[in-house]
Structures are given as structure tokens and as C-alpha cells.
Image: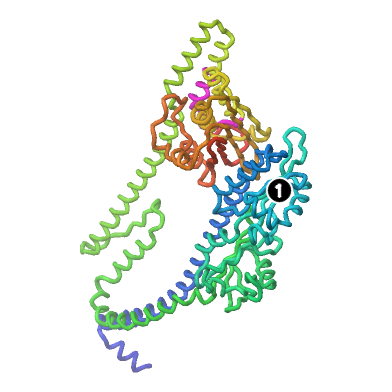
């Protein structure tokens, strides 16, 4: 060792720096290679599990939306309680067939069952032949249950393996039990849709109820490798998951866990229970996280050989004039994360590195300035757009209203003139108030009543509007002019073109910390093409006959802009039957007007 130190001490400063930098670079490269491989494995594992959690969350959102669709269909069927009357069996089967045809990708069989046990089915002929022994059991449970409920998975002669959604139907007047509406869903179709996202060679999934029953269905059309990761019992057909494995999976905590599978260790990602009462679990082969790392090892080995050669040749040239300033610049640039804080670099020298440092500092200042300008422009743009939406009062509406007032005056209907002018003044005062964009639901409903009164003066008995709002809901805060454009749309496009009168019904209630508003009319309704036009209306010029230029999609965009992407409008419509618009908002109790 002494001889080595003496030999090193006798070398020149350049040779010492060369040798030191060469050895340091080799040690640094080896350490970085080892840490990068380890971190790459951890990051890849984390990324896959994170992506899986995102997919699971989106799948739960899809399942919740699926539940909403079923609920809406059941509510739609329940409004036809006239189909439960004796003598309406053929009409009931016809209506169920129509609903089933429009939703064939989601639902398998639809039922209407009278209290006396008479069953009407979307496939009546098939039911008359093979029947369904579960229906009578469901009917007995429906008689003692209030509101919609969901069964555990069972084998149905009509729908195969399925889950049923049941809604008891009672008389609106006497609350007498009239019967129930039942939807048996297509679990094979549901499994296939989810399999497109989760089933691969190295991953699969399972859906379990809170009572440890398997929801997803075995589909023989899928490749067998989709099922090799989980212990299926192949002695029965269709194959079923091993009961012990199901119990073990059901006991897993929410999040990431590990358990034993038939092919080795599995990594399981379990979601929280969705609104259906189901748990979604994604399974990954443990070796899946390491197979892609092997190629990184080979790449590092190859790169190391060339890197050593390059370092030995170039270290001396780079060490004195380039390495240190370039590393300083790179280190500063790597730390750029938040443009609110500018990581400037001290300028040393007037060579290329010094000029590069000055250019970097100038670039960072310019980027920071441009970002600030962009943020301010976006903020002003959003404020301007919202103010414009709320200040568009159509002159034709005022002209038509004043013309109606003039006509009433000529007929000496002084009380009607007084009430109409009072409603017009109140409506304009409500709309032109710029102090805040937010009002209570009670204030919004009051403005809506004034608008409806003016339209009833104009159209006579073309429509009748009723409002049902819970007391707690009335004090919630909403955006001004949320309901008026929807009622206006129902009048002009749903009820006005009809020859006979119609009805608009508005409901408001609090559900699990959210304010749910519905606007329903029994007007002309819309088909799928007309619904697409509604979603495209944001790009169209507003009608001259409207009160404001705020259309349905403008309402939807304003809600999402203020409250987030999870809130907004859902539209359901059937030709001739009518249209239902559902608005979901956060339940914010009014305390004082927001600034």
C-alpha cells in the first residue's frame, strides 16, 4: 500500500485528477446502476399498482353508473303502474320488450309482477315455457321492503347467472302494494366488458359481494389463460372459484395485499365497496413485476463496458474545463419542479458554459413570466365567460312579454297585468343581480316561479309546473340560473309543440351529502340523435325566443367549472314519454353569500 501511495504522490496534478475522476466515475456508475435497477423495480411495481387502482376506481364509477342506469329504468317502469291492472298483460309485455330492446347490452330480462303473482316478462313466451322459481320469492321480499334492493347472484332459467334489481311499486294515493319491477342483468356481458381492461396473461380480476358470493361470470368464449391465475373448480360447468380462495380474498384488507394462487404468489389490489355492495379485486402474478427488469440488467452490463472505455479516453479532457460547470447546470435543471421559484445559477466565466448559464437564467425568467401571463389570462377568461352567460337577456323574450302585458291591458285585466309586471320585474332583478353567482335553492325556485308565471300568461294552459323540495334542500347553495334554462327547454321543445297540455315536475332532495335536483316533463321526448344535438348545443347560437343564452350544456359546464368534474347533468329521454334531467351538486348549506 505504501508503494502505491508513493507512486500516486509522484504523479502530476493532471494525472492525479485523471485517476481520481476515473475511479470515482466507475464507482459512481456502479452504485447508480445498482440503485437504478432497484428503484426501477420498485417504481414499476408502484406504477402498475397505481394504474390498477385507477382502473379499479374507474370500474367502480362504471358500476355506480350501471346502478344509476338500472335505478332510472326501474323508476321509469314504476311510473307505469297502469300496466299492473288486470287486462293490461299484453301491453305490459310489449312495453317491457321495448325497454329491453333499447338496453339489450346491459339487461337480460325485465319483469313486472302484480301483487297477486301474475308475471309479465320482456320474453313472455320463454317465461311461459320455463318459468322462474325465484320470482315468487322476490315478490314476498318486495312486499316487506321499502325502496329498491339488490339480490345476491343466483342461477335464473331466463337469464343464466344473474343479479336482480327489484323496486316495489305502491299506489301513489293509498300506498297499497301493487307489485314490483324486476331487472335481471347480463353478468356474462358485464364480465366481458370488464375483462377488456383487466384480463391479460399476467393479470385478472374477481368481483365479490359483501356476503362472499362471486358476481362475475365464467365465459367459455374467453381464452383459458384468462383463468389460469385463480383456482377455478373445473369439475363443474361453468367452472367456479374455489370457496376457500373466495373466503381468503374476501378477508383481504382494502388496498394492496398478497396471497397464494395456483400458479404462485399473487399481488391483489382490492377496492372499497361500491354502491352495489360489491368489492372489485385485481390480481397480478408476482413475477410480472420482475420480468421487464431483466432486460435492464442486460442493458446496464452492455452500457458499462462502453462507458468504461469512454471514461478512460475522455475524463482527462473533460475534468478540468467541462465536468464541474456542466454538472452544476444539470443539477439545477433537474431541480426545476415549481416555476413559482426560479433556480438561478451563478455565472462564472465568459466561455461557452458561462454563456449557456446566462441563457438558462434568461429562459427561466421568460418561462416564469409567460406562465404568470397565461394563468392570469385563463382566470380572466373564465370570469368573463361566466359573466357573459349570466347577462344574456334575449330581447325577443322582453318583446313578447310586453306584448302580452299590452294585450292584457286592452282586455282590462288589471290584476293579470299587475302580476305579470311584478313577475317580470322580479325576474329581471334576480337575473341582473351581479353581487354573487350563488343563491339558495329557495331563491332559485322563486325566480323560476316568476318565469313560469310569465310563460303561462303567454301560452295559457299549455303546461303546469309543480315543485317538491325538501326543507333541508331549500337552504342549499346553487349557481344562479341553474333550473331556469332546463324548464325553458322543457317548455319550448317538449310541451309547446304538443297539441294538449303537459306537466313539468321539479324535485329536490339531499342524498348522502349531495343535492339531487330533477326536472321532468311529459313532452315529446328525444331519441338518441336528438340527445346528441343537446350535447352539441354549446356551439350553437341561442334561440331568439329564450329568456337567456344559457343552454343545457352551459349549465353543465358552469357546474363542473365551479364544483368539479364529478358533478353536473345527466339526461334521460324517450320519444313520446318525456325527458328527465338529473342534476347532482354538493350539498352546501347557505350561511352567507360567497364573495
Q: Is residue 480 visible?
A: no
Q: What residue is rendered at 47% in x and 75% in y?
A: 38
In the image, taking residue 435 as reference, residue 544 lies left or right, namely left
Q: What residue is rendered at 46% in x and 29% in y?
A: 390
Q: Nearer the viewer, residue 34 or 74?
A: 74
Q: Is residue 539 visible?
A: yes
State the image quarter where residue 162 is shown. bottom right
- Residue 535 x/y as whole percent: 45, 40
Residue furthest out toward the left: 351
Q: Nearer the viewer, residue 545 or 45?
A: 545
Is residue 335 placed above or below 401 in the rendered structure? below
Q: Which residues are magenta?
A: 424-441
**Callout 1: helix, strand or loop?**
strand
In the image, taking residue 543 as reference, residue 60 lies left or right, namely right
- Residue 500 x/y as whole percent: 56, 25
Is residue 420 placed above or below 494 in the rendered structure? above
Q: By what rule are the colours in the image chosen?
A: rainbow
**Residue 438 part of the magenta-drawn span:** yes
Is residue 505 placed above or below 245 in the rendered structure? above
In the rendered view of the protein, which quadrant contains the N terminus? bottom left
- Residue 47 x/y as whole percent: 48, 66
Q: Residues within 10 Å of mark 1 (few under 14, many from 20)?
A: many
Q: Nearer the viewer, residue 243 or 338?
A: 243
* Residue that badge 1 annotates: 119
Amino acid at each position: 500500500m505504501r508503494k502505491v501511495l508513493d507512486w500516486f504522490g509522484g504523479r502530476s496534478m493532471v494525472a492525479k485528477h485523471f485517476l481520481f475522476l476515473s475511479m470515482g466515475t466507475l464507482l459512481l456508475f456502479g452504485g447508480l446502476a445498482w440503485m437504478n435497477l432497484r428503484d426501477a423495480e420498485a417504481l414499476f411495481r408502484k406504477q402498475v399498482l397505481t394504474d390498477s387502482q385507477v382502473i379499479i376506481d374507474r370500474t367502480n364509477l362504471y358500476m355506480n353508473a350501471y346502478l344509476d342506469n338500472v335505478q332510472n329504468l326501474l323508476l321509469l317502469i314504476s311510473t307505469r303502474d297502469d300496466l299492473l291492472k288486470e287486462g293490461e298483460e299484453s301491453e305490459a309485455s310489449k312495453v317491457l320488450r321495448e325497454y329491453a330492446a333499447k338496453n339489450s347490452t346491459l339487461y337480460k330480462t325485465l319483469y313486472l309482477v302484480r301483487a297477486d303473482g301474475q308475471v309479465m316478462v320482456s320474453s313472455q313466451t320463454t317465461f311461459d315455457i320455463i318459468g322462474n322459481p325465484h320470482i315468487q320469492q322476490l315478490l314476498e321480499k318486495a312486499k316487506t321492503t321499502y325502496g329498491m334492493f339488490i339480490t345476491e347472484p343466483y342461477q335464473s332459467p331466463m337469464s343464466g347467472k344473474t343479479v336482480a334489481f327489484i323496486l316495489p311499486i305502491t299506489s301513489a294515493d293509498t300506498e297499497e302494494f301493487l307489485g314490483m319491477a324486476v331487472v335481471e342483468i347480463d353478468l356474462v356481458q358485464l364480465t366481458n366488458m370488464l375483462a377488456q381492461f383487466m384480463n391479460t396473461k399476467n393479470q385478472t380480476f374477481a368481483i365479490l359481494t359483501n356476503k362472499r358470493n362471486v358476481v362475475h361470470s365464467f365465459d367459455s368464449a374467453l381464452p383459458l389463460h384468462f383463468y389460469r391465475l385463480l383456482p377455478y373448480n373445473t369439475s363443474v360447468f361453468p367452472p367456479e372459484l374455489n370457496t376457500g380462495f373466495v373466503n381468503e380474498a374476501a378477508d383481504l384488507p382494502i388496498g394492496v395485499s398478497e396471497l397464494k394462487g395456483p400458479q404462485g404468489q399473487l399481488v391483489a389490489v382490492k377496492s372499497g365497496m361500491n354502491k352495489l355492495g360489491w368489492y372489485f379485486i385485481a390480481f397480478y402474478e408476482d413475477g410480472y413485476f420482475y420480468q421487464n427488469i431483466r432486460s435492464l440488467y442486460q442493458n446496464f452490463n452492455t452500457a458499462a463496458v462502453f462507458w468504461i472505455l469512454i471514461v478512460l479516453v475522455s475524463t482527462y479532457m473533460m475534468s478540468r474545463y467541462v465536468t464541474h460547470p456542466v454538472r452544476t447546470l444539470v443539477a439545477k435543471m433537474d431541480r426545476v419542479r415549481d416555476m413559482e421559484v426560479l433556480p438561478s445559477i451563478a455565472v462564472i466565466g465568459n466561455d461557452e458554459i458561462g454563456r449557456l448559464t446566462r441563457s438558462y437564467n434568461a429562459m427561466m425568467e421568460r418561462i416564469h413570466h409567460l406562465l404568470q401571463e397565461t394563468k392570469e389570462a385563463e382566470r380572466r377568461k373564465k370570469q368573463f365567460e361566466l359573466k357573459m352567460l349570466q347577462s344574456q337577456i334575449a330581447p325577443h323574450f322582453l318583446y313578447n312579454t310586453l306584448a302580452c302585458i299590452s294585450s292584457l291591458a286592452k282586455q282590462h285585466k288589471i290584476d293579470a297585468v299587475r302580476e305579470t309586471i311584478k313577475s317580470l320585474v322580479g325576474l329581471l332583478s334576480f337575473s341582473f343581480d351581479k353581487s354573487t353567482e350563488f343563491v339558495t335553492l329557495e331563491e332559485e325556485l322563486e325566480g323560476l316561479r316568476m318565469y313560469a308565471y310569465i310563460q303561462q300568461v303567454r301560452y295559457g294552459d299549455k303546461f303546469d309546473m309543480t315543485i317538491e323540495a325538501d326543507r333541508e334542500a331549500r337552504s342549499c347553495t346553487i349557481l344562479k340560473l341553474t333550473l331556469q334554462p332546463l324548464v325553458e327547454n322543457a317548455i319550448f321543445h317538449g310541451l309547446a309543440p304538443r297539441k294538449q297540455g303537459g306537466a313539468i315536475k321539479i324535485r329536490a332532495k339531499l342524498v348522502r351529502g349531495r343535492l339531487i335536483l330533477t326536472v321532468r316533463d311529459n313532452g315529446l321526448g328525444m331519441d338518441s340523435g336528438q340527445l346528441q344535438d343537446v350535447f352539441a348545443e354549446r356551439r350553437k347560437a341561442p334561440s331568439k325566443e329564450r329568456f337567456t343564452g344559457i343552454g343545457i350544456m352551459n349549465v353543465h359546464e358552469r357546474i363542473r367549472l365551479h364544483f368539479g368534474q364529478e358533478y353536473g347533468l345527466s339526461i334521460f329521454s324517450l320519444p313520446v314519454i318525456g325527458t328527465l334531467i338529473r342534476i347532482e351538486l354538493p350539498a352546501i348549506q347557505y350561511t352567507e353569500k360567497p364573495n
